[in-house]
C-alpha cells in the first residue's frame, strides 16, 4: 500500500465518500461525467454503494479499494462510481432491487456492474479480494466481467435488458385494492403476533432488528380490540431490548440491530433514525403502564437516556441532528463499548463492583469475544432479591457505577461520526423530541426540536423553497425525496402540539402542498419516491414497504391525516386515505411490511379525539391539564391551545377552524372535547376533562 493523491471524491461532502478520497481507485461520484466517460471509452461502470457506519463497507475498502493491484484492474477496465446510500436513496433503491433479483439477498456494501446507460447486468454485496469460503473473489469477478464485456457483449445486453424490465415491474408495484376496515387491523395483529419471539421478544430470529412501527401497531390493537397478548408482546419486546446489549447502558441510545436472538450482541453502529423511531414506542408503552404510584414507568427512563444521548452526541451547534456513529473505533468493531472484568474492578470500589458485575453480566471470560457487552439479564427487582439489597439502594449503586464507567469511557477513542444532516431522519427525531417533551414535561426536548426544524427550514431549501435532502460543511445538496417531505411534515405537526406555535403548522401546510404537487401519482394513486423534476434514472420508484424506516407512502399518508386534523383541511385527509387505498392490498396481505401504513389506517379509523384547551386567568392550570392529558395513551388525539391574550381577529388562519368562537368560561381554564366530529359541552374542571376524554 502506497500513499496516493486524492481522487475526485475529495470534493464531496459525504463522510463516506471522503473516506475513499485517497484510495488508489479512480473513483467518480454519481453523475453525468462518469457515465459520459464510460460511453466514450466503451467501458462498463462499477457502482459501489455503502454508508459510513457500515462495518463490511470498511472491510471491503481496506481489502480491495486500498489494494494497488485491485485498483489497477478497476481503473484499467472500468469507470468506478462510489455512492453514499444515505445521500442517494433513489439510486440505492433501484440497484438494490436489481441485486436482490440476481442474488435473492441484499445489503451493503452493494456492488453492481452497469452499462454506460446505467443498466445493471451483474451484482452482489461484499466480495473478499480473493476467493475464499465459497465466496468468489473480487479480483476474479473483475477479470471475468472484463472478459464477458469484451467477448460476449450480446450476453451483457440481454442480461441488462431483462434485468431492467424486472426492476421496472417491482419499482412501482400496483397492488390489488382491498377494503380498508377494522379487519385489516385485526389481521395485522394476528400476523405480527404469529411472528413474535415469546422468549426474547422481538419478531423472527437472528439477526434481530427493532420493529418500532410493528410494536406501536400492537399497542393500538390492544387498545382497539382489548387483546392482552398484543400488550404482553410489546412489554416483553421493549423490556428485553432495553435490558439487552443493543441498548447502550452507559451512554444511552440504541445500536442498529442484534446479531443474536436475545438482543445481547449488537452491530454497534448507532443510527439517528432507529433512536428517533423507538422513542414513540417507549413513550406509548410508558403511557399504558402509567399508574398512580410515585415511581415513573420504566420506559420513560429509556426515552430520557436515548434523547439525552442524541443531545450530547448527535446535535450540531446550529441545531440539526447528525446521521450516524460508526461501529468501529481504532479499527475494531465495538471496542469503544465493551469491557473486561479487570477494567471494571480497577474503576469501581469492591463493594460496588460485585453488585454491578452481577447486575450487568460481567464475568472473567466475558460474553462476547472475551469481553463483556453490558446488559441486564435479570429484571432489576429480581437482581435486587438475589443480591439481598433493596431495589432503590441497588438503583443508587448502579447509577453511580454507570457514571464512573461512562466518564472513563469518554477518555477512549470514540467511533467516527457521520455528521451530515438528512431531512427525513431529522423529521423523525423532531417528532421524537416533540412527543417526549409533551409526555415527560421536559422543555429541553421541545427546544431541541425547534432548533432542528428551524435549521432545516433556513438551511435546507433551494431558491424555490423546495427541500434539499442533505446538509454538510455548509452545503445543502440533492433534491429532497418523498420521505423527507413526509417525515418533516409529521415532525412539524408534533412540534406544534409541543409548543402551540402556529408557524410550525404554516410550514407544514406549505411543504405538504409541495409534496402533493411534486410527487403525487395522479393516475395510480399515492406518491413517487422522487419529484417530477428529479434526475431521470432507469426507473421511477414508489416506496410502499417499510424497511428500517417507514415507507415514503405510509409516512405521507400519516402526515396528511395528521395535518388535516390539526388544520381542518378535509382535502388532506382524503388524499391520505387515497394513498392508503393505493397500497391497501399490501396492508392486507403483508402487514409486517406495512407497520407505518397500519398506524395511518388506525388514525384514519379513529376514534379521533380533538382537545382544544383555552387558557383562563391562570396559565398554570392549563399546563396542569395538558400534563394530565399527555399521561394517557390516546394514540389518535390532537391537542390545540389558545392563550387568553389572543383576540378573535388575531387567531392564526391555520388553526382558526378549531379555535374560533371558543373562549374561556368566566376566566376559568376551559376545554372543548370533540370525538368523531361530535363535540361535547365545554368543561371547566380537570375531572370533567378526564371524564370527557375517557368516554368511549
Image (cartoon, grey):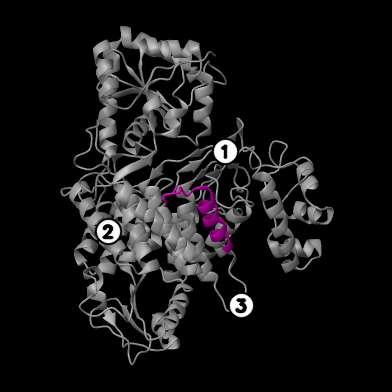
The reply to whether residue 472 is visible in this rendering is: yes
- For disc 2, the marked residue is 507
The reply to whether residue 179 is visible in this rendering is: no
Q: CA distance from mark 2 to mark 1?
A: 36 Å
On the rendered structure, is 599 left or right of 242?
Answer: left
Q: Is residue 47 magenta?
A: no
Which stretch appears magenta?
A: 301-321
Q: Where is residue 165 shown, x and y percent of the image?
A: 25, 30
Question: Circle 1 — which element?
Answer: loop
- For disc 1, the marked residue is 415
Sequence order check: which comes first, mark 3 or mark 2? Answer: 3
Question: Circle 3 — which element?
Answer: loop
Q: Quadrant of residue 50?
A: top left
Q: Main secondary structure of the magenta part?
A: helix
Q: Residues within 10 Å of mark 1 (few under 14, many from 20)?
A: many
Residue at the extreme top: 151
Q: CA distance from mark 3 to mark 2?
A: 40 Å
- For disc 3, the marked residue is 293
Q: Residues within 10 Å of mark 2 (few under 14, many from 20)?
A: some
Q: CA distance from mark 1 to mark 3?
A: 40 Å
On the rendered structure, is 597 left or right of 296?
Answer: left
Amino acid at each position: 500500500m502506497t500513499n496516493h493523491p486524492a481522487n475526485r471524491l475529495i470534493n464531496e461532502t459525504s463522510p463516506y465518500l471522503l473516506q475513499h478520497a485517497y484510495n488508489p481507485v479512480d473513483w467518480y461520484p454519481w453523475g453525468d461525467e462518469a457515465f459520459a466517460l464510460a460511453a466514450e471509452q466503451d467501458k462498463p461502470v462499477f457502482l459501489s454503494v455503502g454508508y459510513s457506519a457500515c462495518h463490511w463497507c470498511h472491510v471491503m475498502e481496506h481489502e480491495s479499494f486500498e489494494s494497488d493491484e485491485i485498483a489497477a484492474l478497476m481503473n484499467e477496465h472500468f469507470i468506478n462510481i462510489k455512492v453514499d446510500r444515505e445521500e442517494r436513496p433513489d439510486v440505492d433503491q433501484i440497484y438494490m432491487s436489481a441485486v436482490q433479483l440476481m442474488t435473492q439477498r441484499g445489503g451493503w456494501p452493494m456492488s453492481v456492474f452497469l452499462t454506460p446507460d446505467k443498466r445493471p447486468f451483474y451484482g452482489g454485496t461484499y466480495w473478499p479480494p480473493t476467493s475464499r469460503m465459497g465466496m468468489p473473489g473480487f479480483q476474479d469477478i473483475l477479470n471475468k466481467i472484463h472478459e464477458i464485456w469484451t467477448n460476449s457483449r450480446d450476453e451483457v445486453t440481454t442480461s441488462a435488458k431483462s434485468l431492467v424490465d424486472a426492476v421496472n415491474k417491482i419499482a412501482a408495484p400496483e397492488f390489488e385494492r382491498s377494503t380498508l376496515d377494522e379487519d385489516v387491523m385485526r389481521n395485522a395483529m394476528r400476523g405480527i403476533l404469529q411472528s413474535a419471539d415469546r422468549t426474547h421478544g422481538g419478531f423472527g430470529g437472528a439477526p434481530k432488528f427493532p420493529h418500532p412501527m410493528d410494536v406501536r401497531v400492537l399497542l393500538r390493537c390492544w387498545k382497539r380490540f382489548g387483546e392482552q397478548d398484543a400488550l404482553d408482546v410489546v412489554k416483553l419486546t421493549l423490556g428485553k431490548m432495553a435490558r439487552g446489549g443493543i441498548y447502550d447502558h452507559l451512554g444511552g441510545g440504541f445500536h442498529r440491530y442484534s446479531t443474536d436472538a436475545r438482543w445481547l450482541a449488537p452491530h454497534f453502529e448507532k443510527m439517528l433514525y432507529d433512536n428517533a423511531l423507538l422513542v414513540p414506542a417507549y413513550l406509548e408503552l410508558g403511557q399504558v403502564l402509567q399508574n398512580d404510584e410515585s415511581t415513573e414507568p420504566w420506559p420513560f427512563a429509556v426515552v430520557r437516556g436515548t434523547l439525552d444521548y442524541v443531545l450530547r452526541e448527535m446535535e450540531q451547534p446550529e441545531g440539526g441532528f447528525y446521521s450516524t456513529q460508526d461501529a468501529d473505533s481504532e479499527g475494531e468493531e465495538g471496542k469503544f463499548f465493551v469491557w473486561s472484568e479487570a477494567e471494571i474492578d480497577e474503576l469501581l470500589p469492591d463493594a460496588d463492583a460485585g453488585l454491578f458485575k452481577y447486575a450487568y453480566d460481567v464475568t472473567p471470560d466475558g460474553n462476547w469475544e472475551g469481553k463483556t457487552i453490558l446488559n441486564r439479564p435479570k429484571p432489576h427487582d429480581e437482581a435486587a432479591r438475589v443480591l439481598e439489597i433493596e431495589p432503590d439502594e441497588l438503583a443508587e449503586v448502579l447509577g453511580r457505577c454507570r457514571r464512573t464507567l461512562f466518564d472513563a469511557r469518554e477518555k477512549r477513542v470514540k467511533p467516527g461520526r457521520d455528521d451530515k444532516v438528512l431531512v427525513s431522519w431529522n423529521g423523525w427525531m423532531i417528532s421524537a423530541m416533540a412527543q417526549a417533551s409533551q409526555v415527560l414535561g421536559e422543555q429541553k426536548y421541545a427546544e431541541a426540536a425547534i432548533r432542528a426544524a428551524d435549521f432545516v427550514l433556513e438551511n435546507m431549501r433551494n431558491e424555490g423553497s423546495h427541500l434539499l435532502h442533505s446538509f454538510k460543511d455548509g452545503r445543502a445538496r440533492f433534491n429532497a425525496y418523498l420521505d423527507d417531505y413526509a417525515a418533516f411534515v409529521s415532525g412539524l405537526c408534533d412540534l406544534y402540539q409541543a409548543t402551540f406555535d402556529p408557524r410550525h403548522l404554516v410550514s407544514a401546510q406549505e411543504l405538504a402542498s409541495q409534496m402533493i404537487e411534486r410527487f403525487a401519482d395522479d393516475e395510480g394513486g399515492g406518491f413517487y419516491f422522487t419529484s417530477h423534476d428529479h434526475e431521470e434514472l432507469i426507473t421511477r420508484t414508489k416506496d410502499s414497504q417499510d424497511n428500517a424506516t417507514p415507507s415514503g407512502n405510509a409516512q405521507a399518508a400519516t402526515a396528511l391525516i395528521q395535518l388535516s386534523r390539526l388544520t381542518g383541511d378535509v382535502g388532506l385527509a382524503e388524499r391520505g386515505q387515497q394513498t392508503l387505498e393505493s397500497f391497501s392490498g399490501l396492508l392486507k396481505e403483508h402487514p409486517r411490511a406495512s407497520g407505518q401504513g397500519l398506524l395511518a389506517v388506525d388514525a384514519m379509523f379513529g376514534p379521533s379525539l380533538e382537545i382544544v384547551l383555552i387558557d383562563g386567568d391562570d396559565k398554570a392550570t392549563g399546563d396542569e391539564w395538558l400534563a394530565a392529558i399527555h399521561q394517557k395513551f390516546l394514540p389518535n388525539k390532537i391537542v390545540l391551545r389558545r392563550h387568553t391574550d389572543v383576540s378573535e381577529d388575531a387567531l392564526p388562519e391555520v388553526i382558526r377552524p378549531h379555535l374560533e368562537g371558543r373562549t374561556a368560561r368566566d376566566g376559568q381554564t376551559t376545554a372543548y372535547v370533540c370525538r368523531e366530529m361530535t363535540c361535547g359541552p365545554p368543561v371547566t374542571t380537570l375531572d370533567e376533562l378526564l371524564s370527557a376524554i375517557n368516554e368511549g
